[in-house]
Amino acid sequence: MNADRLQEGLRTKLFGRIILFLREVGSTNDLAKELAAYGAVEGTVVVAETQTAGRGRLGRGWASPKGGLWFSVVLRPELKPAEAVKLVFVAGLAVVEVLRELYGVRVETKWPNDVLVKGRKVCGILSEMNTTDGKVNFVVLGIGVNANFLENAFPEELKANATSLESELGRKVKLDALFRTLLERLENLYELFIREGFNLILEEWKKYAGFLGCQVEVTSLTEKMSGLALDVDQEGALVLRLEGGTITRFFVGYFSASEVKDNR
């Protein structure tokens, strides 16, 4: 990654006007949260070549070798916390659209925060919020794209479920160009979300949701259930019809699908 080119030709209003680039950091999200707590303006971005303590949802580890695109953005939306949590869908839609347009990769969304290629994770998103008395102080949106490395860079336990752009395309991509395009799309969709609400974002996101209409297994914090994935609703919850016919909703959890289809 050429740090000098990250802002070269960047067509955004706020996002990326301030960029902190590091060769190595524990977690771009952690550093971005520190900066936000000290007053970093909206659109401040932290980018790193590698993360030594990258993580996903619920504290799960995230492998971040050199060659990937690892960055976090500071946001200060004037939203209620229940609305701000939906920013993870904004980021997921941005990633899907950009990867399809730039590289022709048939990527899919996976509830709530992953992007897949052929059922394997190519991107993970981590949204973390700071609030006081029900008011959002800031949100840090972290995006990790497995880009220019092959499967042997993953820990053994991840190799079966993760992939990279290089593996899928048979070539490396230009990280600075991917970063700029993704940041531009993210800002555009963020502005749409703030201006128009969640409905337009959700409807577009669901067009890429290959798991809808499939049998899935969901593991929440307290239980594991199987059923048919019916929908993702306006609150961002996964709607599942259990094997006995009961309809239930999940706000937190991981799931695996026995069948995944590409909706486009």
Image (cartoon, helix red, strand yellow):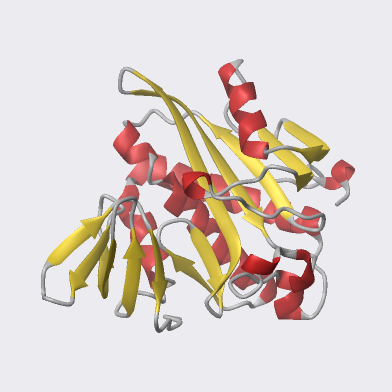
Image side of residue 200 versus residue 151, left or right: left
The quarter of the picture where residue 161 lies is: bottom right
Image side of residue 17 versus residue 257, left or right: right
Furthest toward the left, the residue is 245
Q: Position of residue 138 (x, y in %)?
A: 48, 27
Q: Position of residue 224 (x, y in %)?
A: 30, 63
User: Residue placed at 74% from the left, 72% from the top?
Assistant: 151
From where the camera sits, is residue 105 visible? yes
Q: Position of residue 137 (x, y in %)?
A: 45, 22
Note whether 242 is above or below 47 in the view shown.
Answer: below
Note whether 3 is above or below 229 in the view shown.
Answer: above
Note whether 183 is above or below 118 in the view shown.
Answer: above
User: Residue placed at 82% from the left, 76% from the top?
Assistant: 171
255 vs 123, nearest the viewer: 255
| Number of disc labels | 0
Q: Position of residue 93 (x, y in %)?
A: 49, 59
User: Residue placed at 32% from the left, 45% from the top?
Assistant: 197
Note whether 29 is above or below 215 in the view shown.
Answer: above
The quarter of the picture where residue 158 lies is: bottom right
The quarter of the picture where residue 35 lies is: top right
User: Residue placed at 56% from the left, 45% from the top?
Assistant: 187
